[in-house]
Amino acid sequence: MGKEDVQVQNVPDPKIMNPRDAIVRITSTAICGSDLHLYDGYIPTMESGDVLGHEFMGEVVDVGKGVSNLKKGDRVVVPFPIACGACFSCKRSMFSLCENSNPNAWMAEKLWGHSPAGIFGYSHLVGGYAGGQAEYARVPFADVGPIKVPENLTDDQVLFLSDIFPTGYMGAEMCNIQPGDPTAVWGCGPVGQFAMKSAYLLGAGRVIGIDRFPERLRLAREKVGAETINYEQTSVLETLKEMTGGRGPDACIDAVGMEAHLPGLVGAYDRAKVALMQETGRPIAVREAIMACRNGGTVSVIGVYGGFIDKFPLGSFMNRSLTMRTGQCHVQRYLRPLLERIQKGEIDPSFVITHRLPLDQAPQAYQMFRDKQDDCIKVVLKPGAGSGQPAVH
Amino acid sequence: MSQNPKLPHSTPPQRSRRGTDGYERLAKGLGWFSIGLGAAELFAAGPLARFIGIRDTGRHRATLRAFGVREMGAGVGILSRQRPQGWLWARFAGDILDIGSYLSAASEGVTSAGGVALTLTSLAGVTALDMYCASQMSRLPGSATADQQSRRAAHSAIITIDRPAEELSGRLRDFIRMRGESGESRVFTSGVQLSDQPGTQGLRWRAPGIGGMAVAGSIRFEPAPANRGTIVRAELDSPWNTGAARIAGKVFKFAGGEFVQNELRKFKQLVETGEMAVSDATVTTSPREAQPAGELVHA
Ligand SMILES: NC(=O)c1ccc[n+]([C@@H]2O[C@H](COP(=O)([O-])OP(=O)(O)OC[C@H]3O[C@@H](n4cnc5c(N)ncnc54)[C@H](O)[C@@H]3O)[C@@H](O)[C@H]2O)c1
Ligand SMILES: [Zn+2]
Ligand SMILES: [Zn+2]
């Protein structure tokens, strides 16, 4: 299945195919937890040779004749969902649900009932677009997505506008946090870090991060100011009760997704079910988030799921009047307001970066990020240092 | 061929040897089989290719996964209905496609002769079972309405476009002609003819089709509630009602509804965004990797 096999290959340079396209020469790109789901084979319809990557920025080198707001030389960050800006969903600012950007919509409809937007480098189910872990990328609807960024901000400061900063922000925003609300975040990966930071920006009283890797928990404490729970050392449900006067957090955010880890019986149960293809992910964090949430509270799911899951605690969810909100991030909606926050110095998103490597070293970078070697939290890849682009093999 | 979209009628009810329950159980079994097989094709295409004795290439995996998606769709369809004969016929159509594609994949080189023998025997077996179950179910008393409904779903298409009908009716005519000239469409093929539906803004179309199987149908417009533009509905005619032509018709119509749906989607893209979405993997008609197209594009 080409699992765990990322290679750097030479591929043709992309060309303008439609009037509203632009070609971007990539200056920085990153590996996302979502790429790991592809890497580990949890998202179907990846083909050998597909170019990965959906977090990228760079310089505009060509524009189609339908793009009037960008010109050659502009420095832009590109949002990961591809959106037309004109359809029912786009008009309602739900850009990751664009009705016009997934040319393989029929495939997604079979698996999910209806199709979401196309996404760069994220399997054929969401379009089969070549991704941004490359030297150049073709950007459709370039008049809607990319945002120009000022020269005084570095790539490292603005790159994460493409995905994980808006994603974390949307995760917190969906909880409708009221001043002082206790908020818990499962997963202290890069997305979790931004969810915690955003919860504070939106007025949360107390933010609690849950993970098992000491360096990630430390980052949450030191750079975000969160309290942390190591789920390998203490019971998450008991500790959260303890911390919230027995009620549970008002807002519970799943920033883990379908590859959640859990030692012991429940974890083994889900691993076995996945191996037997009885479910397509391990929904351990979202189950726990539901059980932990205060009566009437909100569970926000930004961790990615692909197919079907088992033992979903619908009883707890229904009887306790919980709300669940979810989605691939509607990045375009957040670009401008979050860029302003960066400019005002309210946040410097580069705090999650632990490694910068040439694009050539993508195979090692994937392995390091997946296995959390060398305290890796977020890898930024720099094209130009080498010559090829990573592709699944 | 009739001018009106005609719904196929079922043969008069007959007493069957097996009870109704028996067929329903068999259908459920086939439904679960579809889901299991579909999941295997979708999530384990590589190992499956090796198991059935064909080369484990990217293209074979892509085909297996596409089939997996179709298979799961059929499985869900079968399990969600008490009388799923429409979906069983769809499975049957899929079986034929499977056998054809399998033979063509195997002709490129076989990695395990035992695997091939086993696969062909199983494919033949399950095809016979699907056809048997589908034809028996179609004969059960009370099948007509359910049958009509599921068939209608299999050869119709629907989409909402954010524009008034007055604007769409002219543009749709241009679009269909353009698709006919492009030679890329499987339903609006070259030589497609259009006629008006008197008293409406809708139209009828008739095209030579592919392989001598003419296709025809009608497209209607109605306003979408709450100012959401226009609902566009397309319906394929069902001129095949007897014998072998009927089966050929079923094979085509299962795919036909999807082909028309894809055309409506392209039309919506063109109207709403000014262009038709293409990705690196869709620039050619056969599945390929998501890499910049380069020299690979053959116009
Ligand atoms: N919705 C969106 O638009 C969107 C965008 C980007 C990423 N994502 C998703 O967000 C998720 C996180 O992304 P990331 O880049 O931070 O990935 P990551 O793999 O770096 O982080 C996941 C973290 O979850 C932790 N974890 C695993 N099991 C856990 C458990 N049972 N309880 C608590 N923590 C657990 C891991 O130790 C890890 O630190 C992924 O599923 C990714 O696909 C969603
Ligand atoms: Zn991402
Ligand atoms: Zn749109």
Image (tube, coloured by chain):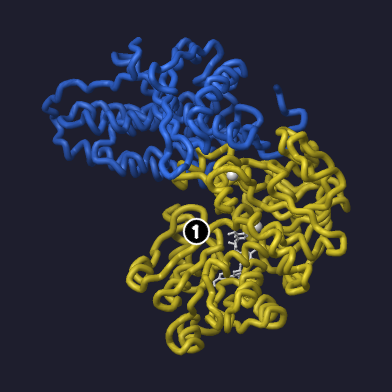
Residue at 49 percent of width and 59 percent of height: A281
Q: Which residue is mark 1?
A: A281
Chain letter, colour blue: B
The quarter of the rendered structure image containing the C terminus of chain B is: top right
Residue at 72 percent of width and 44 percent of height: A143
In the picture, residue B105 is in which quadrant?
A: top right
**x, y (%) of residue A158?**
77, 62
Image position of A370 (left or right of B160):
right
Image position of A16 (left or right of B51):
right
Image position of B206 (left or right of A85):
left
> Is B277 drawn above or below residue A387 in the view shown?
above
Q: Nearer the viewer, residue B231 or A12?
A: B231
Secondary structure found at label 1: loop
What colour is chain A? Answer: yellow
**x, y (%) of residue A57?**
78, 53
Amino acid at circle 1: Gly
Q: Crowding at label 1, few (<14), some or many (≥20) Cα neighbours within 10 Å?
A: many
Image position of B169 (left or right of A160):
left
**x, y (%) of residue A53?**
70, 51
Kindly tell me whether residue A353 is visible in this rendering.
no
How many marks do you count on the picture?
1
Residue at 53 percent of width and 42 percent of height: B45
**x, y (%) of residue B288?**
64, 34
